[in-house]
């Protein structure tokens, strides 16, 4: 598989490992229009790559990803046709992650916010630096977690906790995320790479097909949930994106002030 056309993502092979890096560190790997579009086909391509068996995904620089790019959010509000396409992309992202039968190891090198948390939770095993934070602050900008957070968070930490974190946008520190069962491991920065490398090598020594079939079996319930929930979630997100409160949130970010919501 040729990955040379990807620009937001850097894709490299190391033996049977496909290393994928979110590669926009100047903007904390925040998802642009191009980045979102690329991710909608990335894991389909990765699944079809005959030269790899394990996928490792991480971020360049000091963040895994800050979530959505501010200008992208404004453009989605201003251009309904773009929002319609983005909804299709969001569904493909979720379904392709769940359908990819190769183990996906997520190496969270810094904060994983919004779509970053979703990407981590749709992966199979998550290792995070102990300073990383997870969270889905869609509600803080007048949106909803229609792209997957509302699906995955309750499965990991229960509905009561999930509702709290989605309502408030509070961030979860990596050590606390381990205790909640949200991620697998939290480590100091100088131990993260070695821990992930050792884990990947352990998986590569195991029977590849049984790993794939185990993942496919475990993900059946998640795939069913995704197909039953995401149309409604993305429809609500599209409606929320047209509210005055969402525009106010965008304006407040630009002006570096707290938003003044009017519930409109």
Image: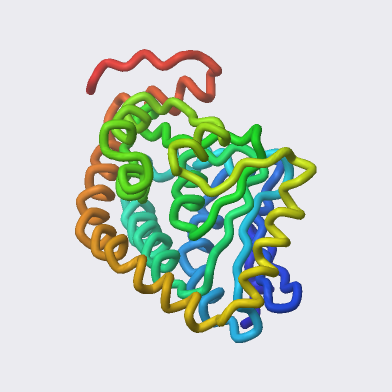
Please state which of residues 61 and 4 is positioned toward the viewer in this rendering: 61
Is residue 207 visible in the rendered structure shown here?
yes
87 sits left or right of 128 in the view: left
Please state which of residues 35 and 197 is positioned toward the viewer in this rendering: 197
Quadrant housing the N terminus: bottom right
Residue at 42% from the left image edge and 32% from the top image edge: 137
Please state which of residues 93 and 165 is positioned toward the viewer in this rendering: 165
The outermost residue toward the bottom is 50
Residue 38: x and y in percent read 53, 63
Residue at 50% from the left image edge and 83% from the top image edge: 209
Please state which of residues 8 and 16 is positioned toward the viewer in this rendering: 16
213 sits left or right of 33 in the view: left
Is residue 79 visible in the rendered structure shown here?
no
Residue at 25% from the left image edge and 58% from the top image edge: 225
Residue 262: x and y in percent read 27, 16
Count of numbered labels shown in the rendering: 0
Quadrant housing the C terminus: top left
Q: Quadrant of residue 65?
A: top right
The outermost residue toward the right is 190
Residue 206: x and y in percent read 60, 77
Q: Quadrant of residue 173?
A: top right
Residue at 32% from the left image edge and 48% from the top image edge: 155
* 264 shown above or below 136: above
* 31 shown above or below 45: above
Residue 223: x and y in percent read 30, 65
Q: Quadrant of residue 82?
A: bottom left
């Amino acid at each position: 598989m040729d990955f040379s056309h990807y620009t937001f993502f850097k894709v490299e092979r190391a033996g049977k490992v496909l290393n994928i890096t979110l590669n926009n560190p100047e903007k904390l790997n925040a998802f642009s229009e191009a980045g979102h579009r690329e991710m909608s086909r990335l894991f389909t391509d990765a699944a079809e790559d005959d030269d790899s068996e394990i996928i490792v995904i991480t971020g360049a620089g000091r963040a895994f990803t800050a979530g959505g790019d501010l200008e992208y959010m404004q453009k989605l509000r201003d251009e309904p046709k773009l929002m319609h396409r983005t909804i299709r992309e969001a569904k493909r992202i979720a379904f392709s992650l769940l359908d990819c039968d190769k183990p996906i190891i997520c190496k969270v090198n810094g904060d994983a916010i919004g779509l970053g948390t979703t990407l981590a939770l749709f992966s199979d095993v998550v290792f995070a630096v102990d300073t990383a934070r997870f969270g889905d602050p869609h509600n803080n900008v007048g949106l909803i977690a229609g792209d997957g957070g509302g699906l995955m968070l309750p499965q990991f930490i229960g509905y009561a906790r999930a509702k709290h974190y989605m309502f408030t946008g509070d961030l979860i520190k990596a050590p606390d995320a381990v205790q909640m069962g949200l991620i697998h491991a939290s480590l100091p920065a100088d131990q993260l790479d070695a821990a992930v490398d050792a884990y990947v090598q352990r998986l590569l020594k195991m029977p590849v097909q049984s790993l794939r079939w185990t993942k496919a079996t475990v993900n059946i319930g998640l795939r069913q949930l995704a197909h039953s929930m995401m149309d409604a979630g993305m429809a609500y997100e599209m409606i929320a994106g047209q509210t005055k409160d969402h525009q106010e949130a965008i304006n407040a970010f630009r002006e570096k002030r707290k938003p003044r919501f009017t519930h409109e």
